[in-house]
Image (cartoon, grey):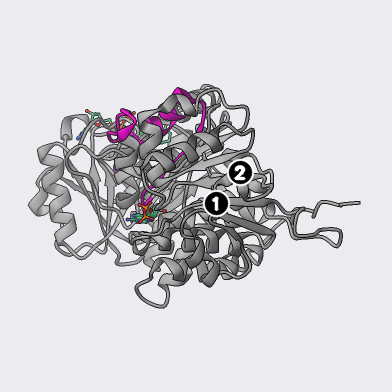
Amino acid sequence: MTGLHTADQVRAAESQVLARTPEGALMQRAATGLATVCLRLAGRAVGLRVTLLVGAGDNGGDALWAGALLTRRGAAVTGLLLDPARAHPAGLAALRRAGGRVTGDPAAAGLHRADLVLDGITGTGGRGGLRPGAAEAVARAVAGPGLLVAVDLPSGVDADTGAVDGEAFPAQHTVTFGAVKPGLVVGEGRGFAGRVHLVDIGLELPAPTARQLTDADVAARLADPGAGDDKYSQGVVGVHAGSATYPGAGVLCTGAALRSRPGLVRYAGTAAEGVRAAWPEAIVTDGRPADAGRVQAWVVGPGAGTDDEARSVLAEVLATDLPVLVDADALTLLAASPELARGRSAPTVLTPHDREFTRFGWELGGDRIGAARTAAADLGVTVLLKGDATVVAGPDGTTFVNGTGTPWLATAGTGDVLSGVVGALLATGMDATEAAAVGAHLHGRAGQLAAAGGPLIASDVVRHLPAAVHLLRTAPHVPRARPPVIR
Ligand SMILES: NC(=O)C1=CN([C@@H]2O[C@H](COP(=O)(O)OP(=O)(O)OC[C@H]3O[C@@H](n4cnc5c(N)ncnc54)[C@H](O)[C@@H]3O)[C@@H](O)[C@H]2O)[C@@H](O)CC1
Ligand SMILES: Nc1ncnc2c1ncn2[C@@H]1O[C@H](COP(=O)(O)OP(=O)(O)O)[C@@H](O)[C@H]1O
Ligand SMILES: [K+]
């Protein structure tokens, strides 16, 4: 599990360490880690041409100290001082002592022929997008041949939200200190961070503000069936999805549920004929959810329509004491009657994309974690806010940011697949917020496997779910959940 820590959390932890270490020690640790990663990425030191983009704060200090270390190893380092009067004095002196050169002129900083560019413009102290002088230097860096490495955080990216208000440094790698900040993995920031390398600088961190699951975390939450299991003991999920007009959503959602947990899937809805034909393994009725038989969780909404019948099915399902996942058309209905979800005795999971989210009247700006949390607290539900980095927030504030997936998932029907996956996990009795996060991770891995063969369609994601489970299970160091013993 990767903990995500806000800039304030990291700063508070840093000040504790600063109080008991010699001046500059923490920055030395950061700079040493940064230089080490740079050498690994570049594969050599001697003759390496490095340009440092140096801002006015400690982020620039990190870059200058790392530049000094690289100079001592034989690199040719130039520091471009964006605010020469305020460049970190000790860092600047160190670079000069080591034999590095500095300039205030972007045209003389060697960006057109650098092998490596270190972005030390702003880190956690940055506010808003890049200012004009910084933006010009970044444009030169991007136009040049150098590998783009951000120091702590790509400048111009908000550390806590990933919001980019204007321009930012498009890093290929980010070397971050002490903790991964949310802005590196969520929102626009995710697209600017490139590959994230975490350097331990010895901080004692509080509980993270949000978490990202690893393959091993997810595998550990997917228990194998045991000798005592039968088809009922692994969770029975009910699906109300699709319609005579849109049978596909029912087929995809049911198939995804079947392929996630091979227990039992009951389907109730007007796409019954199509679902029966596609999935002989499902138990299918063309009646209402109450006619489907006993289940442990419901998925309601994908392709199910927004007419009076759909509205009454949603009300019926939400009136049960079972976990319910509400998606697609059922979200549109729920947005008009949100009281249906308030105060339920069992968990409710909403899985909106952006347009569905805003239908509830919730604001969606650059802070997707904050938005999902506000929504979850408002209704007392788990909210899975879809996107390239899906955010899951529980009613108690527990938050996950998904780290798997591929833009190829931006195709019709993949959301129906996600609903089926998460619904199947809910039916196993898994905590609802965890089920949403585990489901999003698994869905993303299945999407990646499906996309390895070229453009994918939603049924490819369904087909790749078993391979995705296998991939997670064979991830290194997976502590496997013990199957429940049923007597
Ligand atoms: N606090 C500590 O003990 C440590 C901090 N470290 C580094 O220190 C950084 C934080 O340093 P600071 O708090 O000094 O702040 P930063 O260096 O991140 O940025 C502040 C400076 O950038 C300027 N600035 C703000 N927004 C800007 C924008 N949009 N465009 C251009 N310039 C802008 C400000 O005027 C200010 O001078 C961390 O990200 C990390 O890199 C590390 O050395 C580890 C130890
Ligand atoms: N650019 C993207 N990168 C990665 N994943 C994406 C991207 N766009 C959408 N997705 C994922 O694809 C799925 C789309 O779901 P949704 O919008 O509900 O589609 P549909 O309603 O057609 O089933 C979600 O899981 C979402 O997170
Ligand atoms: K930076």
- Horizontal placement of 130 versus 447: left or right? left
Residue 348 visible, this angle: yes
Q: Amino acid at mark 1?
A: Gly
Residues shaded magenta: 359-388
Q: Where is residue 193? Give x, y as percent.
A: 34, 50
The residue shown at (86%, 62%) is 227
Q: Answer with the quadrant where ligand 1 appears in the image.
A: top left
Q: Mark 1 — residue?
A: 287
Q: Where is residue 226? Give x, y as percent.
A: 82, 60
| Near-viewer residue (460 or 166) | 460
**Dividing the picture into quarters, in which one does residue 216 lie?**
bottom right
The residue shown at (67%, 63%) is 262
The residue shown at (45%, 71%) is 460
Q: Mark 2 — residue?
A: 290
Secondary structure, mark 2, is: helix
Q: Amino acid at mark 2?
A: Ala
Marks 1 and 2, how far apart in space?
Answer: 8 Å
Residue 96 visible, this angle: no
Secondary structure, mark 1, is: loop
Q: Residues within 10 Å of mark 2 (few under 14, many from 20)?
A: few
User: Mark 2: is the Cβ under 8 angstroms from ligand 2?
Assistant: no
Residue 87 is tagged as none
| Near-viewer residue (225 or 50) | 225
Q: Residue 270 colored magenta?
A: no
Q: Find out whether the residues at labels 1 and 2 contact each other: C-beta distance under 8 Å.
A: yes
| Near-viewer residue (460 or 190) | 460
- Horizontal placement of 118 versus 328: left or right? left
Q: Is residue 423 above or below residue 368?
A: below
Q: Where is residue 116? Give x, y as percent.
A: 28, 60
Q: Residue 377 colored magenta?
A: yes
Q: Where is residue 21? Give x, y as percent.
A: 54, 28
